[in-house]
Amino acid sequence: MAIQFDNTNTGTVTLKPPSSGTPSFILPSSDGSNGDILTTDGSGQLSFTTPSSGGGGGTVQQIVYADSNSTISRNTTAYISSGVSQSITVGDAANKVMVRFTGLYSVQYINTAMSINFRLYRNGSSIKSFSGSPGYGYAFNNTYFYRFFALEWVDTPGAAGTYTYAFYFNRGSGYASYSALLLGTKVLTLMEFTP
């Protein structure tokens, strides 16, 4: 087999050798499919391959959200609803759901560092726990610390169907009478995607 040049067109192609070395390439025996790319096996054998979908990006199927604008206080370690939940209908068993919950919380400082805990529920069952402390330097007794939060979790429901997600929260253990509050607008966003 030999390489043939067709000079009936007016355009030009320039091939330039490397500054050193003598690489050798073996061309594929047939044309690839639409969208294929030319790849090498590292030993000079070239072939057409279909490119992968990328570095874990995936395809977004839908995005839904719910919000709530209320203040909810908790002064025990028992979990209570954050006041916002959202349902999503997943179309395929292989799809995943990115769950994102954002808002503002406050924790009361009483003689020691305090914390707030969150739990993510799917269809009434806890599937993930989050714990946090706003971080304290020197603080006066009965001071409230305010922090924005953003919690994220990628869930794999495992089957097509409708799923309801909700966050619950409590104050951490410690001093018996301190409070944890969720303040103002809280947003729960669900994104179904194909990995």
Image (spheres, rainbow, N blue to C red):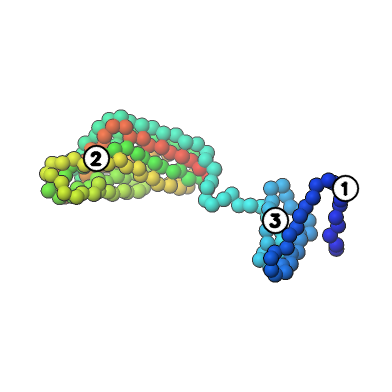
Residue in the foreground of this view, choosing between 182 and 162: 182
Contact between labelled residues 1 and 3, with CB atoms less than 8 Å apart: no
> Label 2 is placed on what type of residue?
Tyr
For residue 146, the mark is 2
Instruction: Choose the circle earlier in sequence order: 2 or 3.
Output: 3
> Label 1 is placed on what type of residue?
Thr
Q: CA distance from mark 2 to mark 1?
A: 74 Å
Say which residue appears at 26% left-offset and 39% top-offset: 105
116 sits left or right of 47 in the view = left
Contact between labelled residues 1 and 2, with CB atoms less than 8 Å apart: no
In this view, which residue lies farthest toward the top? 69
Measured as percent of width and height from the top left, residue 80 is found at 26, 39
Element under disc 2: strand
Name the residue carrying label 3.
38
Say which residue appears at 36% left-offset and 47% top-offset: 127
Say which residue appears at 29% left-offset and 38% top-offset: 104
For residue 8, the mark is 1
Q: Is residue 92 visible?
A: no
15 w.r.t. 157: above or below = below
Element under disc 1: loop
112 sits left or right of 11 in the view = left
Q: CA distance from mark 2 to mark 3?
A: 55 Å
Residue in the foreground of this view, choosing between 146 and 83: 146
Badge 1 local density, few (<14 within 10 Å), some, or many (20+)? few
Measured as percent of width and height from the top left, residue 151 is found at 35, 44
